[in-house]
C-alpha cells in the first residue's frame, strides 16, 4: 500500500536521507529503528510533506479507490491521504483546555457526519483503546500519561484511516503501561487490517509486533528485512550489534503469552 523508492531528503545543502527504499503491505507493521540522529523522524516528516523530497518517489495505494498515487519531487505534496499520526508525547499532542471527547472528535475534521454518527464513532474509538466513557468530560491534565496516549490513539482511529504512523508512542510511558498500550495498538491493527509505520528504539516491541524492520544509520538504510530474518540473520554488522546489545539487556525477552500477562483495565491506565 506504500512504496518508497530511492527517497532522498536534503536540508541546508546537507543530505539527511539517502536512497531509502521500502514497501509496506496492507495490514503490515514496519518498524523503523536506528540510533538518535539516524533520520527516523526526518523520514516521517518527508512522508507527511513537512520536508520536501530531493529525489525518489512515494507510491501510495488507497484501499478505498484502489488507485496508486505517485508523489515526486517538485509536486505540491501535503502528505499521505487516509493516514493518521500518533506522536511521542501525548501531553504535548493534546490541548490541555479541551475535553477528551472533543479532542478525539477532532480526528474527524474532514468527515461530514451527523452528530449521532459522530457520537457512535466516539464510543467505538473509546472501546477500541479500552478507555471508559466517563473520561470524555475530563481534560488532559486530569489523565495519566497512558490514558492521554490512548486518547491520541482514539483520535487517530476515529477517522477510520488505512494507515497509522507512530513516532515513538510508547517512550514516554512506564514499562507496564507500555506493554498494555503496545497490545492495544496491535489488537487494533489486527481488528482493522491497518498498516503501521512505527518508529521505535524498543527492539523488544519490534521483535514482538513488526512484520518488517527498516534500520537507519546516518540517514542511510543499513537493512530492510522481514522481522524474523532481521533478528535471525541481520543484513548488517551494525544490526547484529544492536540485537546483541538488546539481548544482553534482556530487551528481547518478549513473552509469547503477552496478552495473558498484561491485565486489561476497565478505564485504561
Ligand atoms: N531541518 C533540518 N535542518 C538540518 N538538519 C536537520 C533538520 N532536521 C533534522 N536534521 C538533522 O538530521 C539528522 C536526523 O535527525 P532526525 O530527527 O531525523 O533523527 P532521529 O533518528 O529521529 O533521532 P531521534 O531518535 O533522536 O529522534 C540529525 O543530525 C538532525 O540534526
Image (spheres, grey):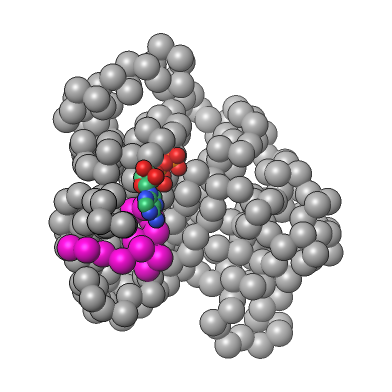
On screen, 48 above or below 147?
A: below
* Residue 56 can be seen, yes or no: yes
Q: Residue at x 68, y 43 (%)?
A: 146
* Residue 183 can be seen, yes or no: no
Q: Residue at x 38, y 75 (%)?
A: 78
Which residue appears farthest toward the top when viewing the image?
248
- Work out which quarter of the rendered image holds the N terminus and state it: bottom left
| In the image, residue 51 lies in the stretch drawn in magenta | yes
Direction from residue 40 to residue 169 in the image, left or right: right
Near-viewer residue (180 or 69): 69
On screen, 6 above or below 120?
A: above
Q: Residue at x 27, y 44 (%)?
A: 219
- Work out which quarter of the rendered image holds the C terminus and state it: top right
Residue 188 on image: x %, y %: 51, 53
Direction from residue 77 to residue 123 in the image, left or right: right
- The magenta span reads 42-55
On screen, 105 above or below 247?
A: below
Direction from residue 202 to residue 76 in the image, left or right: left
Residue 96 on image: x %, y %: 77, 59
How many numbered circles are shown?
0
Which residue appears farthest toward the front when viewing the image?
12
Q: Residue at x 55, y 83 (%)?
A: 111
Give the quadrant of residue 137. Answer: bottom right
Residue 27 on image: x %, y %: 35, 56
Residue 178 on image: x %, y %: 59, 36
Amino acid at each position: 500500500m506504500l512504496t518508497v523508492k530511492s527517497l532522498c531528503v536534503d536540508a541546508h545543502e546537507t543530505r539527511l536521507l539517502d536512497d531509502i527504499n521500502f514497501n509496506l503491505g496492507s495490514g503490515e507493521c514496519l518498524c523503523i529503528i536506528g540510533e538518535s540522529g539516524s533520520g527516523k523522524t526526518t523520514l516521517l516528516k518527508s512522508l507527511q510533506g513537512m520536508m520536501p523530497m530531493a529525489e525518489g518517489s512515494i507510491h501510495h495505494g488507497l484501499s478505498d479507490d484502489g488507485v496508486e498515487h505517485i508523489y515526486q519531487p517538485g509536486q505540491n505534496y501535503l502528505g499521505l491521504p487516509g493516514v493518521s499520526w500518533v506522536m511521542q508525547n501525548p501531553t504535548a499532542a493534546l490541548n490541555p483546555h479541551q475535553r477528551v471527547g472533543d479532542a478525539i472528535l477532532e480526528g474527524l475534521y474532514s468527515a461530514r457526519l451527523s452528530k449521532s454518527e459522530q457520537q457512535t464513532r466516539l464510543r467505538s474509538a473509546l472501546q477500541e483503546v479500552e478507555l471508559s466513557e466517563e473520561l470524555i468530560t475530563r481534560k488532559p491534565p486530569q489523565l495519566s500519561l497512558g490514558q492521554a496516549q490512548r486518547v491520541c490513539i482514539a483520535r487517530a482511529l476515529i477517522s477510520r484511516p488505512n494507515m497509522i504512523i507512530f513516532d515513538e508512542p510508547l517512550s514516554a510511558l512506564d514499562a507496564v503501561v507500555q506493554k498494555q498500550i503496545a497490545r492495544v495498538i496491535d489488537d487494533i491493527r489486527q481488528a482493522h487490517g491497518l498498516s503501521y509505520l512505527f518508529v521505535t528504539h524498543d527492539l523488544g516491541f519490534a521483535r514482538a509486533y513488526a512484520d518488517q524492520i527498516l534500520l537507519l544509520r546516518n540517514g542511510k538504510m543499513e537493512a530492510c528485512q522481514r522481522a524474523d530474518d532481521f533478528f535471525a540473520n541481520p543484513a548488517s554488522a551494525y544490526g547484529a550489534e544492536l540485537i546483541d546489545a538488546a539481548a544482553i539487556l534482556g530487551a528481547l525477552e518478549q513473552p509469547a503469552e503477552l496478552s495473558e500477562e498484561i491485565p486489561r483495565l476497565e478505564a485504561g491506565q
